[in-house]
Amino acid sequence: MSKFDHLLPRIELLLDRLEDAPSTPIDWKKTHAARWIAETRSLRPIARPHRIEARHLLTIDEQKQKIDANTRQFVTGKTANNVLLTGARGTGKSSLVKAMLAKYAVKGLRLVEIDKAGLAHLPELFDLLPQSPQRFVLFCDDLSFTADEPGYPALKAALDGSLSSSADNVLIYATSNRRHLMPEYMAENEETRHVGGEVHPGEATEEKISLSERFGLWISFYPMGQDEYLAIAAHWAKELGAKDHRSETFTRSALQWSLGRGARSGRTAWQFARDWAGQGK
């Protein structure tokens, strides 16, 4: 027997006590964002949430208008929808949700970040969020599922279908590169039936659609063109203090950067602008 074996029961007891210890309630008047920790089933305040002003998000005016209107309804106590933001990578989906916190935190909006693993415990999270003047958006970033993941049925039930409903002061905003949040396969098209001239998707396709359609508001994002990419790069270079953000050298360097990354997106433009400004140009 190891000389440390007699310590194992005490260590296990200590760990059990730590897991069962009640977490300190969050002061939502002072805390604007928190993170749901699936392992401990608890909320952890985020001391310095990443904020971005909506004015910095260029070329997505229609998307901004839609989510702003929905969020404004929500914080003023009116009815609003759960939101699914889908589309191309790096086009501002996550940044737009963060921009809503920057704009509406003073009016009581609070953001709770939850990852895919935490979705399985949504009912517990709902119970922890207070019935208070604050309005809570559960933020699920870069979401996608396989059909057998536990978070899938939990999210589906939370959106619409559970006997118990979330509070009136809670909404879910999710971002994904997939419109239906799940991978789609060519073989599923073979299940499609034609009845009376109409196309009826197969059961696998219907199941995938059934999750995304429970979001009341869909906001789509699209790949951007060269002019849009350059406008965003110039905007951020100016904001970061670069003096040269209009020259042919700037334009050529920005395009070379996007070719090296294999993408033209707001994220790529931001990364280039940071590099350009950092070089003191």
Image (tube, rainbow, N blue to C red):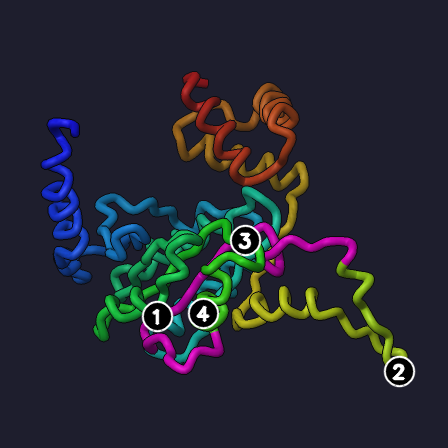
The span from disc 2 to disc 3 (Cα, nearest Å) is 34 Å
User: Which mark is in front, 2 or 1?
Assistant: 2
Q: Callout 1: 10 Å neighbours few (<14), some, many (20+)?
A: many
Estimate the x, y position of residue 137 in percent, counting from the top left.
36, 63
Q: Earlier in the sequence, mark 4 or mark 2?
A: 4
Q: Circles 2 and 1: CB distance less than 8 Å? A: no
Front position in the image: 56 or 120? 120
Type of amino acid at the residue the image marks with label 2: Gly
Q: Left or right? Give the position of 210 relative to 174.
A: right
Kindly state the secondary structure of the residue where label 1 is placed.
strand
Q: In the drawing, what numbered circle is on residue 144?
A: 3
Front position in the image: 78 or 161? 161
Type of amino acid at the residue the image marks with label 3: Ser
* Residue carrying label 2: 196
Give above or below for 195 relative to 244. below
* Residue carrying label 4: 70
* Residue carrying label 1: 170
Residue 73 in which image quadrant: bottom left
User: Which mark is in front, 4 or 1?
Assistant: 1
Type of amino acid at the residue the image marks with label 1: Val
Estimate the x, y position of residue 177 in percent, counting from the top left.
58, 50
The span from disc 4 to disc 1 (Cα, nearest Å) is 13 Å
User: Which mark is in front, 4 or 2?
Assistant: 2
Kindly state the secondary structure of the residue where label 4 is placed.
helix
Q: Left or right? Give the position of 83 relative to 86.
A: left
Residue farthest to the right, as pictured: 197
Q: Earlier in the sequence, mark 4 or mark 3?
A: 4
Kindly state the secondary structure of the residue where label 3 is placed.
loop
Query: Which region shows up in magenta?
Result: 160-187
Kindly state the secondary structure of the residue where label 2 is placed.
loop
